[in-house]
Image: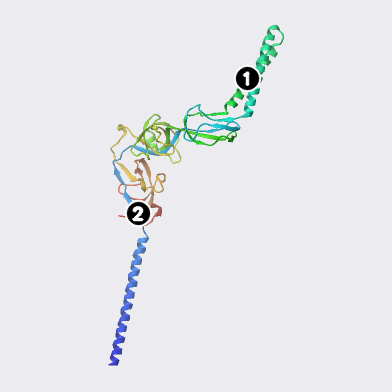
Amino acid sequence: MKIVRIILTVVIVGALLVWGGMTLVNNKKKSEEETKIVAQVNESVAVNVAKVQFENMNVDYVANGTFEPFQEMKFPSEVSGKVLKVFVDEGSYVRVGQTLAVIRGDSQSIDLTAAQAAYQNAITDNQRYENALKTGGVTQQQVDQSRLQLKNAKAQLDQSRLKVGDMNIRATISGVVNSRLIEPGSYVNPGTEMFEIVNVSSLKLRAEVNENQIVNLKVGDNIKVTASVFPGKEFAGKVTFIAPKASSSLNFPVEIQVSNSAGNELKAGMYGTAIFSQSKDEITSKPALVVPRQAFVGGLNSNQVFVVKDSIVKLTTITSGRNFGDKIEVLSGLNDGETVVTSGQVNLADGSKVSIIK
């Protein structure tokens, strides 16, 4: 009976060992298969995609830019001296000719006094020579010399008056004081910057327009302008300059003067959009082949997109046309129905494997 028990125990232990071994082998195979699947998935990059297709687009062309002041001027000192008074603060509105500050110039005042005295002496001497010439007491040469001395004295007086006038710092444009860099008691030298004044009653919007649209523009055209901080609101603009030469991006710089609102809502440095509307005669009903703006690798200027075929991407250079905001016209390089990557490009290279996010 004891032998039977021993044999039974050995059989049970052996069966347990065999079962455990088979379980470990099966688990190992399952783990390896899962690892292979994960490795296969990790080899691909998850991306969003979109189809290249023909669409009927709004043919208005838009160009983005930054608002700049219509006038902007910095006021450096032209003389040396101590600032006696400052009459404006940052944010103050000033008009042309308004006194902004007064500088004390002792040497300029002394020079003006001396120039006035010299000028009066020159007048007296000239009158004496003119009278003496009538009686023959002096020669014509002496009279001519006195007249020259009078002119020189007058020029010296005018110059001294200008220097003294420079002691009063006056605005040469109307606008708002954007920065004030002096205080009463400051000492300034020629070239010391004192004020910066900007005029934003109207602004300039600088944008770039491609060659397909520039041929439809001329100086004086009225343009609708919007600002990103005022959605739905339009401002009146007028083309004041069209560059005769394209920039490095092969677009043409255009300057648009924009009328500000009564409360000067627009500020220099804000982001703006110019909307170039075409006339009805220029509008065509032919659909345009377009690609999402987000498909461009590194921005529109690159003219490169990733095209997806059989889960592999190919970096493709295209020729872009009109800008429709979130869609860009494709002139060449892509065909209708092709698939392009719209997000995840930063992780891609030519030939990368991708998995499309549904």
Label 2, label 1: how far apart the Cα atoms are = 81 Å
Residue topped by disc 2: 47
> Quick one: quadrant of the N terminus?
bottom left
Residue 254 appears in the picture as rendered: no
20 to 216, vertically: above or below: below
In the rendered structure, find residue 20 and report the number of the disc placed on it.
none
Judged by depth in the image, the label closer to the viewer, 2 or 1, is: 1
Q: Is residue 1 visible in this depiction of the protein?
A: yes
Location of mark 1 (residue)? 154
Q: Quadrant of residue 280?
A: top left
Q: What residue is rendered at 36% in x and 41% in y? A: 321
Label count reads 2
Determine crowd level at label 2: few under 14, some 14-19, many 20+ residues with C-alpha closer than 10 A.
some
188 displayed left or right of 66: right
Q: Residues within 10 Å of mark 1 (few under 14, many from 20)?
A: some
| Quarter of the image that includes the C terminus | bottom left
Judge by depth and name the residue closer to the eye, 302 or 342. Answer: 342
Q: Specify the amino acid type for callout 1.
A: Lys
Q: Is residue 234 above or below residue 31?
A: above
Tell me, yes or no, whether the two marked residues, 2 and 1, touch with CB atoms within 8 Å: no
Residue 342, position as x, y percentages in the image: 35, 50
Residue 135 rendering spot, x and y as whole percentages: 70, 6
- The residue positioned 31% from the left and 75% from the top of the image is 23
| Residue depicted at 29% across the width and 44% down the height | 54
- Between 153 and 348, the residue placed more toward the observer is 153
Q: Quadrant of residue 326?
A: top left
Q: Earlier in the sequence, mark 2 or mark 1?
A: 2
